[in-house]
Amino acid sequence: MKSANFLTITTILFILLASIGHVVRDRTVELGLLMYIPLLPLGLWTILWDLSQMGHSLPNFRFSLTLVGLGIAVWGSVSMLGTGHTQIDLAENSVSILHWNVRWGGRNGWQSISQDIIQRNPDIAIISETPAKVKLNQLLNQLGKQWSMITYNDKKRNPLAIYSPWPLQLEDYVKIKNVSAMTVIVTLNNQPLRILAIDSGRNMSTKFAIMSREILPRWRTPMLADMTKTIADYQTAGKPIDIIAGDFNALSISLGFEDFDQVAGGYNLAAKFSNDWRGTWKSYLPLYDLDHVWVHKRFTGLRAKLFTNLKTDHRGQIVNFNN
């Protein structure tokens, strides 16, 4: 009986902490940790636990914890499911962008990952945490002679690579807090698209560690604020950014992302225009959406689809819109 009471109290405590985290969000590093308590699994656990107690987890309110768990599960599902694509049809010359964190080519999975990219045949492929340059060149050769590639730098393992059969131009390396970032111009059907491709640094904060192990996520608010300023500065300079894509290592509910709705005319989070579960990490149990593609609101017909390859630990996504 005591153990049952302990589990009930612990469940209620996690529900309170998760609710605070998802409502208040990451106003501090500590509150940011609470955002990472996933609502859907917590809600399902709450329902199963109360049912196992025949609804008597809270003795004076039979099945009340089941109802609470159902509410938490619905909240978690609604907040992580896409709402479907726009009602505007895609034109023949619509653009497709693939983004994927491939975690250095996966564990002996680069051939499988490469085939996934080739089969989807995007106009632009933005790859994070890429493998050694020799493997990047192998993919380039497989894609065909028309394709070209730009990498962030010439390290053995590149944080960013962009492929396209359309003309590519590296414009700038961009300074953003804790981020590798570059702007690349892709010219599709004589129309230039400016892409801000980013790869955020490690997700865990080295400032909060116990016995040399990090226990709290890195606070992403300064990074997102710096990114918003960068986007605004490019707009002011007459170089508007059309697409922002990469591994942000930040949940979409993080404070700072709401500024993307207004800055430089505003951007839509592409994954919300899918019919899919939006989590991208980890691929076998994607509880967290850490990888994002943001598309400027001037584009129409936006839709997205997420996909999984268990050779790497992130899910990929392919985004379509009218240029």
Image (cartoon, rainbow, N blue to C red):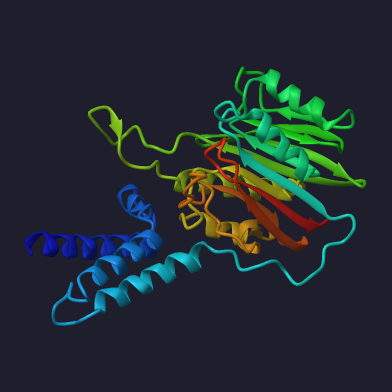
Q: Would you place residue 244 above or below residue 141 in this image? A: below
Residue nearest the viewer, comparing 154 with 86? 86
Residue that appears at 77% across and 29% down: 149
Residue 316 place in picture, x, y as percent: 62, 45
23 horizontally vs 114: left or right = left
Residue nearest the viewer, comparing 65 with 174? 65
Residue 54 place in picture, x, y as percent: 21, 75
Residue 248 place in picture, x, y as percent: 54, 43
Q: Would you place residue 237 above or below residue 181 in this image? A: below
- Total marks shown come to 0
Residue that appears at 25% across and 79% down: 64
Q: Would you place residue 27 above or below residue 66 in this image? A: above
Residue nearest the viewer, comparing 32 with 55? 55
Residue that appears at 60% across and 41% down: 309
Q: In the picture, residue 74 is in which quadrant?
A: bottom left
Residue 68 place in picture, x, y as percent: 31, 74
Residue nearest the viewer, comparing 209 with 107? 107
Quadrant in which the N terminus is drawn = bottom left
Residue that appears at 33% across and 42% down: 216
